[in-house]
Amino acid sequence: MNLIEPSWDFYRTFLMVLRERSLSAAARQLGLTQPTVGRHIDALETSVGFPLFTRSPHGLMPTDAALELRPYAETLAATAAALLRAASGQHGAIGGTVRISASEVIGVEILPPILAELHRDYPDLSVELSASDVVEDLLRQEADIAVRMVAPAQETLVARHIGAVPLGFHAHRSYLERRGIPQTLEDLSRHSVIGYDRETPAIRSIKGRAPDLPIGRFAFKSDSNLAQLAAIRAGFGIGICQNALAARDPDLMHVLADAFELKLETWLVMHENLRATPRCRVVFDALARGLLDYLRQ
């Protein structure tokens, strides 16, 4: 291995090539030229002493060594982004950038009005919202604050328990007028049910808490909870969504309320190192108030 430490820029380029599997695509994302990206990869390979990519009909394929380096490059990228967010809030007033991680449904359906009110009060604040069902790692600084449906296990995280979000079966009024209202869980076998495409740990957890659900197949399947919600709203069939969210639409009807209900415990979490950071504290408190107001619905 070359003793000269590679430039951090090389790892940034390496990570983008990993994601894009193409020098030209990585160059477009980074705002560089393709030859520059190629030189970065060549220099990094020279420094580490082994090849990182091989060419294939499907683009640049990472070697096993490259895949082993990937988590370290991702940690560098997350740390660099966190450093810039921290630097952005050092001018005295409440301002700068805060990155929030939340599930698709929470990020798209619940947080925007909360964040809009926050921005009116603190116009110098900039928010980065990662709306994904992938749990981002706060210890690696992939986000500053997270809304989670599981209790945090790490002791170095500051957590506030917001409460339980109740979920139930819902359907659009137009669907129920066509197909009738199920009276028992067994009736679901005669209805168009909306559900998941692949069984994830979260799905297995839900199934474990509701083992008696008699669902043999789904008429509509998607890994996206937002897509499932859209299908419910469109009148495709019966699906599970948050009760408070469905209550906003008078055409969405809660069915089998006495036979089925799930509750998702909700937590607001950030790294303990950020608790004294003014911009993060303000955002954390605003999210807590807004989410509590939502649950009171």
Image (cartoon, rainbow, N blue to C red):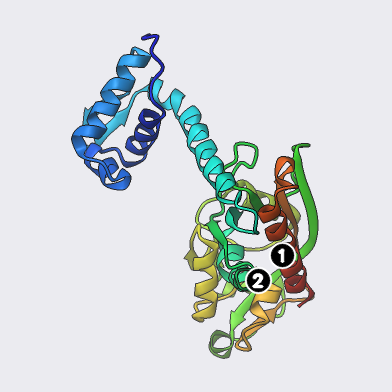
Picture quarter containing residue 126?
Answer: bottom right
Query: Residue 294, image x and y in percent?
Result: 72, 73
Q: In this view, does 36 lie above or below 81?
A: above
The amino acid at mark 1 is: Ala
Q: Is residue 51 visible?
A: no
Q: Residue at x 56, y 42 (%)?
A: 82
Q: Distance between the residues labelled 1 and 2?
A: 10 Å
Q: Are marks 1 and 2 in contact (CB under 8 Å)?
A: yes
Picture quarter containing residue 41?
Answer: top left
Name the quarter where the C terminus is drawn.
Answer: bottom right
Query: Residue 43, image x and y in percent?
Result: 29, 21
The residue nearer to you, when weighing 169 against 44, is 44
Q: How crowded is mark 2: few (under 14 residues within 10 Å), some or many (20 or more)?
A: few
Q: Identify the element where label 2 is drawn.
A: helix
The mark lying in front, picked from 1 and 2, is 2
The amino acid at mark 2 is: Asp
Q: Which residue is drawn at 63% across and 48% down?
A: 144
Q: Which residue is drawn at 39% across and 34% down?
A: 12
Q: Is residue 113 visible?
A: yes
Name the quarter where the N terminus is drawn.
Answer: top left
Query: Residue 63, image x and y in percent?
Result: 34, 23
The residue nearer to you, when weighing 177 against 47, is 47
- As drawn, the label of residue 121 is 2
Q: Residues within 10 Å of mark 1 (few under 14, many from 20)?
A: some
Q: In this view, does 205 lie above or below 262?
A: above
Q: In this view, does 163 lie above or below 55?
A: below
Total residue callouts: 2
Residue identifier under label 1: 286
Q: Identify the element where label 1 is drawn.
A: helix
297 relative to 193 in the view: left or right: right
In the displayed orientation, state which residue is furthest to the front. Answer: 92
The earlier-in-sequence mark between 1 and 2 is 2
